Image (cartoon, helix red, strand yellow):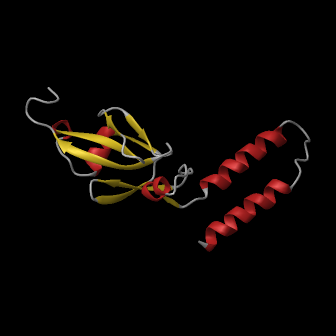
Amino acid sequence: MNNNKERKETAINHKQQPNPCGTDADARENELLEDVVELLEEIVDLEECALANRRPPRARRYRIRIDKHKYEVEVPAMTGRELLTLAGKIPVTSYMISQKFRGGEAKKIGLDEKADFTTPGVERFMTLPLDQTEGC
């Protein structure tokens, strides 16, 4: 926690220093530094963000829930195939995965479709085994 504070202070202090070139690079540098400060969030729990009704910030890691288990991932988005593999649902073609949003709405995620963890309201993911006649 203290380490994050130091990084933020370093980025903010660096941001306050004028660019000696005095060009349009100043604006671009400020944008980049804002992104760096935003990325300093170490881990974001999607379920907590959804319950607090706030958009998940960009982070180094995301804590996601698939069925009853929580996982930490280091990417801001994963495909349905990757999520099913992470949850141990093998073969992935025998399962479907849905994204549950705050308020109860659910959206099916295709095997090659990406689920973006920075989307507002994403609460968790749910898997369901497919019957022999489904998905064929």
Image side of residue 121 versus residue 20, left or right: left
The quarter of the picture where residue 21 lies is top right
Furthest toward the left, the residue is 132
The quarter of the picture where residue 114 lies is top left
Furthest toward the front, the residue is 103
Image point 74% across, 65% down: which residue? 9
Q: Nearest the camera: 25 or 44?
A: 44
Residue 72 is situated, as x and y percent measured from the top left of the image, at 40, 58
Q: Is residue 125 above or below residue 41?
A: above
Q: Nearest the camera: 125 or 81?
A: 125
Image point 91% across, 47% down: which residue? 20
Image point 14% across, 37% down: which residue? 130
Furthest toward the top, the residue is 136
Residue 77 is situated, as x and y percent measured from the top left of the image, at 44, 43
Furthest toward the bottom, the residue is 2
Say which quadrant the C terminus sits in.
top left
Q: Nearest the camera: 95 or 54?
A: 54
Say which quadrant the N terminus sits in.
bottom right
Image side of residue 113 versus residue 20, left or right: left
Image point 35% across, 58% down: which residue? 71
Residue 123 is situated, as x and y percent measured from the top left of the image, at 40, 51
Q: Is residue 19 above or below residue 4?
A: above
Q: How many marks?
A: 0
Image side of residue 41 versus residue 92, left or right: right
Residue 43 is situated, as x and y percent measured from the top left of the image, at 50, 60
